[in-house]
Image (tube, rainbow, N blue to C red):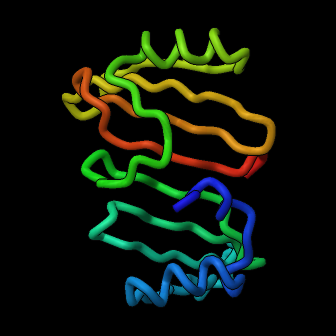
Amino acid sequence: MDIISLLGKKLKSESIIELFEKYGVDVFYEYDRLNENISDKYSASIDELGLEFSFNSEQTLRTIFIKNESPLEVIVRFSTIEEAEKYSNENALSFKKGAVEFLGTFREWIKLFYSNYSIHYEFQNSTLHMVTLEVVGA
């Protein structure tokens, strides 16, 4: 499955419909019920694959969250920030990185920028915790 190719697709596109039907996915609609001028959004998840999908108000897939336990091998995974930085340099990719301690957990991250998407790697206590794929400008 080429999960990256799903970014930017509409909720009702054939590839997303096929994937969601295969796994019996329910789509959740979140609307601005308090009239706070917040955009509506749609979300879905495939727990057995460790995936969460976030669509904007136009029903365009903007973000895919991949939990570390995900059995999918659809992207390059790194054991350390240094590996990701080395990969970025070797492949002429720009990146940003940072670190913070939050609620007693040390978190490091690095975000690699490709031409039309980015991949954000979050490490907690030096272990890869989550990967986020995003359309550039999301």
87 vs 115, left or right, is: left
Q: Is residue 122 visible?
A: yes
75 vs 59, left or right, is: left
Q: Which percent across, then down, holds residue 118?
A: 65, 39
Within the image, what quadrant is residue 25 found in? bottom left
105 vs 123, left or right, is: left
When the figure is inspected, residue 86 is found, relative to residue 8, above or below; the finding is: above
Q: Which percent across, then down, holds residue 10?
A: 73, 77
Q: Which residue is at a point 52% across and 62% down the rendered structure image? A: 1
Q: Which residue is at a point 41% across and 33% down the rendered structure image? A: 77
When the figure is inspected, residue 83 is found, relative to residue 46, above or below; the finding is: above
Q: Which residue is at a point 24% across and 34% down the rendered structure image? A: 103
Within the image, what quadrant is residue 3 found in? bottom right
When the figure is inspected, residue 110 is found, relative to residue 22, above or below; the finding is: above
Callout count: 0
Q: Is residue 37 visible?
A: no
Q: Which percent across, then down, holds residue 129?
A: 30, 39
Front position in the image: 136 or 83: 83
15 vs 57, left or right, is: left
Front position in the image: 29 or 38: 29
Within the image, what quadrant is residue 23 found in? bottom left
Front position in the image: 24 or 45: 24
Q: Which percent across, then down, holds residue 90?
A: 63, 10
